[in-house]
């Protein structure tokens, strides 16, 4: 009886090892191509990152279509950032800064601060842009500016000069692409359960 049990254990172990080897072989053979296994894994990973439903901040209704979800988040963040420019926030900032003693600039440094931006400053900034970063609302990553440095430097200097001298920066400078991450342990239905990253 002991010998039969030992033989059965060896057969089951051999069968389990064979199944593992077969699944590993199947994974590596089919994993590099567009296959059911890869599609399943991608679908599973993507479903973990998607927002399935959200409660609209103003309408208090549950939104389930991707377009409605995007509009709900847009309305929430637009309202949030519009209110951050209110006079109460400005008064809080003024109160905070009036209580601390910051060093003041010398006359020479103050004059340097109001000088027009130079080509050398723009070049230095372009050179320090990091690779493999997502682009802003203009759709151009840092590598684009680095590649076309020669052509863009003078144009950027003119844009900065106009914005600073007229006090009228382009509207896109105050825009951002916001992605949301679900806060772990929070209910995914209300918008407060997500952390914005821009």
Image (spheres, rainbow, N blue to C red):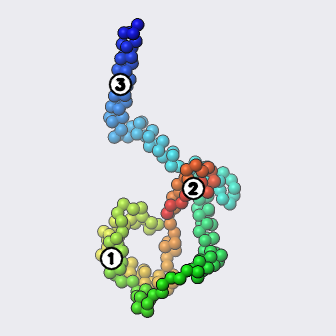
* N-term-proximal mark, 1 vs 3: 3
Question: Mark 1 to mark 3: distance in Å?
Answer: 60 Å
Would you name the residue on which mark 1 appears?
Answer: 123
In the depicted structure, whether residue 122 falls above or below residue 111: above
Q: Residue furthest top?
A: 1
| Residue 74 image position (x, y, % from top left) | 58, 62
Left or right: 143 as drawn, with respect to 100: left
Left or right: 41 as drawn, with respect to 143: right
| Residue 48 image position (x, y, % from top left) | 51, 46
* N-term-proximal mark, 1 vs 2: 1
Disc 3 is placed on an element classified as: helix
| Residue 106 image position (x, y, % from top left) | 43, 90
Would you name the residue on which mark 2 appears?
Answer: 194
Crowd class of label 1 (few under 14; some 14 to 19; many from 20; radius 10 Å)? some
In front: 77, or 4?
4
* Residue 75 quadrant: bottom right
């Amino acid at each position: 009886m002991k010998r039969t049990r030992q033989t059965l254990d060896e057969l089951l172990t051999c069968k389990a090892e064979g199944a593992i080897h077969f699944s590993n072989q199947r994974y590596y053979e089919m994993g590099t191509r567009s296959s059911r296994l890869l599609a399943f894994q991608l679908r599973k990973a993507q479903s973990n990152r998607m927002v399935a439903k959200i409660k609209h901040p103003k309408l208090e209704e549950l939104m389930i279509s991707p377009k409605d979800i995007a509009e709900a988040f847009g309305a929430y963040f637009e309202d949030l950032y519009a209110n951050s420019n209110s006079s109460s926030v400005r008064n809080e900032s003024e109160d905070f800064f009036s209580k601390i003693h910051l060093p003041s600039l010398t006359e020479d440094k103050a004059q340097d601060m109001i000088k027009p931006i130079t080509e050398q400053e723009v070049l230095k900034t372009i050179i320090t842009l990091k690779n493999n970063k997502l682009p802003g609302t203009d759709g151009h990553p840092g590598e684009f500016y680095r590649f076309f440095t020669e052509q863009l430097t003078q144009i950027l200097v003119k844009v900065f000069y106009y914005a600073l001298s007229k006090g009228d920066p382009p509207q896109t400078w105050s825009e951002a692409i916001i992605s949301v991450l679900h806060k772990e342990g929070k209910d995914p239905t209300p918008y407060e359960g997500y952390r914005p990253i821009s």
